[in-house]
Image (cartoon, rainbow, N blue to C red):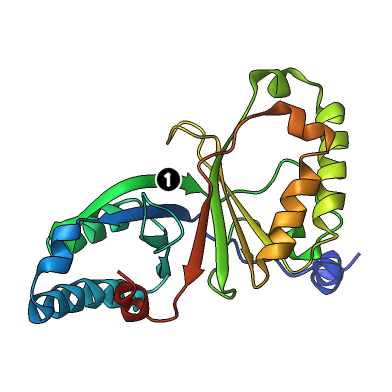
Amino acid sequence: MRPGANTATTTETAAPARPKLPTQYVNFSFFKLDPAFRRLTEEEQHHGKAEFAAVVREYQERENVFALPYSLVGIRPDAELMLWRIANDLETFQEMTARLMRTGLGKYLEITYSYLSLTKRSVYVDFMDPEHQNPRTHIVPGKFKYLFVYPFIKTRDWYQLSAPARQGMMDEHIQVGSKYPSVKLNTTYSFGIDDQEFVVAFETNDPKDFLNLVQELRETEASRYTLRDVPMFTCIHHEEVEGALETL
């Protein structure tokens, strides 16, 4: 055999390597506004919101960073603003939050909930949804008007089941989800880095579809092994952070 002949054959038949996407850190921060802010003059309110918005926009312009604003005004009494943030490191969240809380608006905000998680591949093979077949390790958020977020914990009994038993129940779970293509699921993982095990975030343009999906999922076998899936947050996306701040 001529030297190099085998190498040429391998080069021609080998599939191109897929680029490895970095693991993303994910944070959902919920803010409650002190009513005292609304008693400030209009000029003071405007200046405080402008400072806050400038910090958010600065991070939005950074590579590999997402900072999406959502409003919950009129929906929940304990949260009025939410930032869905994604970055390649934890320090970005800490640095950004410190700067936000020093702004004129930030001085009147309380963080009432904050969930930290990571992206990773699912241990369950999702053959029904090609979008999630490969990288669940990379989220591109913000393409839908509504976002539904909640922390999620399974019972310890779930983890004592055999892998085939869990896979079978998850196949049913996946089959139900496939009936609602208008709802995009983003599952992230919190084992050891926050109180919950998962944070799930559903994006859709039709809240009725999400309601029907959750109702149907309650009837699946896997639902028996849910320990906690509250609080649940209904969030309305704003393309510009100023729009979300104007609802406060």
| Residue at the image position 62 percent from the left and 66 percent from the top | 19
In the image shown, does 167 or 157 lie closer to the viewer? 157
Q: Front-most of 158 and 107?
A: 107
> 13 and 174: which one is in front?
174
Does the rendering let one see residue 224? yes
- Residue 57 lies, in percent from the top left, at 30, 77
Residue 93 figure quarter: bottom left
Instruction: Give the left or right position of residue 153, taking residue 240 as reference.
Output: right
* Residue at 50% in and 34% down: 196
Q: Is residue 58 left or right of residue 38?
A: right
In the picture of the structure, the residue carrying the numbered disc 1 is: 115
* Residue 45, image x, y percentages: 14, 75
Tell me the quarter of the picture where residue 7 sits.
bottom right
In the displayed structure, does residue 179 sit left or right of residue 78? Answer: right
Q: Dividing the image into 4 quarters, which one contains the C terminus? A: bottom left
Secondary structure of residue under mark 1: strand
Q: Nearer the viewer, residue 23 or 227?
A: 227
Q: Position of residue 62 (x, y in %)?
A: 34, 74
Q: Is residue 13 above or below residue 170?
A: below
Quarter holding the N terminus is: bottom right
* Residue 125 appears in the rendering: no
Q: Residue at x 42, y 63 (%)?
A: 74
**Residue found at x 70% / y 18%:** 157
Mark 1 packing: few (<14 Cα in 10 Å), some, or many (20+)?
many
Residue 123, compared with residue 176, is above or below; it is above
Q: What number of labels is visible?
A: 1
